[in-house]
Image (cartoon, rainbow, N blue to C red):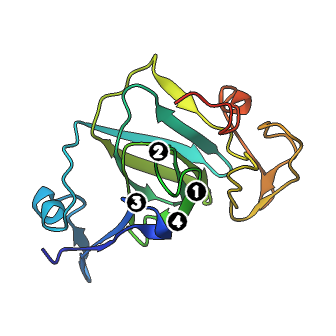
Amino acid sequence: MGRITVEKNVGGIEGLCVITPQVHGDSRGYFVETYNQKDMLDAGLDYTFVQDNQSSSVKGVLRGLHFQIKYPQAKLVRVIKGSVFDVAVDLRKASPTYGKYHGVELSAENMKQLLIPKGFAHGFLVLSDTAEFCYKCDDFYHPNDEGGIAWNDPEIGIVWPHLQGDYNGTPCAEGYSIDGAALILSDKDQKLSGIKDAVF
């Protein structure tokens, strides 16, 4: 071990980890191992990832809060261009931190990664002009198994940085902006219910 630094149970939430890889830089640029299974195992993180995903989004896009219902996924997420505010919400009903969230800025500059165990909802807000977001999953995507929670559910109370606007009782994006850019959500995400009414 030694090529990654792991901060475990971030935000007081069991299993949620921030991982910072070791970066080797010189006048030519840099080299970094973005994933090493042995280092993960040495840190006590035993995951087998089966799918890699990547998305590109413009400033003000908010994706989430998403999860799979019958086939929950653990995720290892990072940003390779720009920056986002990344959020995980504990949906494990037996957990002492059920309903609690933790957010962290992930960027191409800080190269931090967030390890999200099974049983969490996940989402992110793009802070930069554009962002490219990558994540590993330990189960495959099941299109008929999607679940979600409203990004602005007051029961959870996520504080999204730089976001301006007043809660109007719905997850609609209208009236919200970030640094002058309108908040952008999918039609589906603007119809999600709060944690009390969500199915998971």
Quadrant where the N terminus is found in the figure: bottom left
Crowding at label 3, few (<14), some or many (≥20) Cα neighbours within 10 Å?
many
Residue 138 coordinates in the image, percent (x, y): 27, 39
Marks 4 and 3 sit apart, C-alpha to C-alpha, by 11 Å
- SS state under label 2: loop
* Residue depth check, mark 3 versus mark 1: number of the one nearer the observer: 1
Contact, CB < 8 Å: mark 3 with mark 2? no
Pointer 2 residue: 92
Which label number is shown at residue 100? 1
Question: Amino acid under label 3?
Answer: Leu
Above or below, 199 against 109 in this view is above
Pointer 4 residue: 104
Which label number is shown at residue 16? 3
- SS state under label 3: loop
Task: Classify residue 158 by image quadrant.
Answer: bottom right
Residue at image x 73%, y 64%?
162
Residue 175 coordinates in the image, percent (x, y): 88, 46
**Front residue of 105 and 127:** 105
